[in-house]
Amino acid sequence: MVKRDVSEQPIEIWMEGYEVVEKIAKPCATSASVLVPKGWIGKKVRIVRLEP
């Protein structure tokens, strides 16, 4: 398994978009998942971690 360096300090991110949802990532096999609205299927999305 490769450990990636992940910043534990907040960074400023500016995005322009159409809709925002805030959710908790849930365990999913060996990863995590965030469910988004069904209407987002096939759309480009971005996920931003809000906590260290």
Image (cartoon, rainbow, N blue to C red):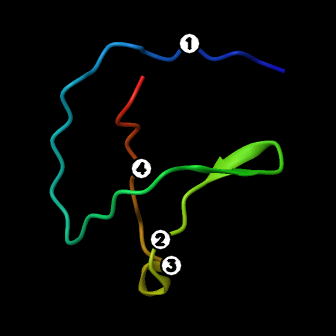
Q: CA distance from mark 4 to mark 3?
A: 15 Å
Residue type at mark 1: give it: Asp
Circle on res. 5: 1
Relative to 42, 32 lies left or right: right
Q: Earlier in the sequence, mark 2 or mark 1?
A: 1
User: Residue at label 4?
Assistant: 47
Q: Position of residue 14 (x, y in %)?
A: 15, 41
Q: Position of residue 32 (x, y in %)?
A: 66, 47
Q: Earlier in the sequence, mark 1 or mark 3?
A: 1
Kindly check if marks 1 and 3 are in contact, taking CB atoms under 8 A apart as contact.
no
Kindly check if marks 4 and 3 are in contact, taking CB atoms under 8 A apart as contact.
no
Q: Nearer the viewer, mark 2 or mark 1?
A: 2
Q: Position of residue 9 (x, y in %)?
A: 33, 13
User: Residue at label 3?
Assistant: 42
Q: Residue at x 34, y 57 (%)?
A: 22
Q: Furthest residue to the bottom? A: 39
- The answer to which quarter of the image holds residue 23 is bottom left
Q: Quadrant of the C terminus?
A: top left
Q: CA distance from mark 2 to mark 1?
A: 27 Å
Q: Earlier in the sequence, mark 2 or mark 4?
A: 2
Residue type at mark 2: give it: Val
